[in-house]
Image (tube, grey):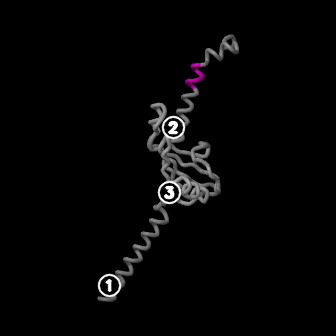
């Protein structure tokens, strides 16, 4: 009877150790309280979470893991504080960015390195804005280059 209790306790401790190992190995991300901590973690591509609260946006950065020669960083836009109303549609969206290992840069600074719904919506907004600018200035372009005869 006593031997069975000891075996049960040892098994319970082993299961707890395994559960903690899985949690800290896969699911736990240390929180960075300042940009220096985040910068250091990004350069080393170590797991970390950082909330950036700027004048314009509230963003969450989550350094996931190295993938090949890149560091995978999840970017989530929580809040747009300044800007057009259509930017509010971006709130809650996220994307994954792949930065070269050992570099320090804002993950969303080069959207070519990113993929996800946030990137797609940003690109849609940029394209629509460019289209609107072109349509508004089409008459000026036509008259200044005398393109009306060609069209």
Mark 1 surroundings: few (<14), some (14-19) or many (≥20) residues within 10 A = few
> Mark 3 sits on what residue?
32
Q: Main secondary structure of the magenta part?
A: helix
Residue 43 within the segment the image draws in magenta: no
Magenta residues? 131-136
Q: Is residue 86 above or below residue 35?
A: above
> Mark 2 sits on what residue?
121
Q: Is residue 73 left or right of residue 5?
A: right
Can you give x and y, in whole percent of width and height, for residue 43 in the image? Answer: 61, 57
Visible residue check, residue 26: yes
Q: Residue at x 58, y 20 (%)?
A: 135
Q: Residue at x 49, y 55 (%)?
A: 33
Query: Residues under labels 1 and 3: Cα distance?
Result: 43 Å
Q: The C terminus is located in which quarter?
A: top right
Is label 1 in a helix, a strand or a loop? helix
Visible residue check, residue 76: no
Q: Is residue 77 above or below residue 146?
A: below
Q: The N terminus is located in which quarter?
A: bottom left
> Mark 1 sits on what residue?
5
- 1 and 2 marks in contact (CB < 8 Å): no
Q: Earlier in the sequence, mark 1 or mark 2?
A: 1
Q: Earlier in the sequence, mark 3 or mark 2?
A: 3
Mark 2 surroundings: few (<14), some (14-19) or many (≥20) residues within 10 A = some
The circle on residue 53 is none
């Amino acid at each position: 009877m006593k031997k069975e209790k000891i075996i049960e306790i040892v098994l319970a401790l082993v299961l707890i150790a395994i559960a903690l190992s899985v949690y800290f190995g896969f699911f736990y991300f240390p929180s960075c309280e300042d940009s220096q901590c985040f910068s250091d973690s990004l350069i080393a591509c170590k797991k970390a979470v950082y909330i950036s609260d700027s004048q314009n946006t509230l963003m969450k950065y989550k350094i996931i893991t190295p993938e090949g020669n890149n560091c995978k960083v999840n970017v989530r836009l929580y809040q747009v504080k300044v800007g057009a109303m259509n930017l509010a549609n971006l709130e809650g969206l996220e994307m994954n960015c792949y930065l070269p290992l050992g570099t320090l840069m804002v993950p969303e600074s080069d959207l070519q390195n990113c993929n996800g719904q946030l990137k797609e919506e940003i690109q849609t907004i940029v394209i629509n804005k460019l289209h609107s600018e072109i349509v508004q200035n089409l008459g000026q372009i036509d008259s200044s280059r005398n393109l009306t005869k060609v069209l």
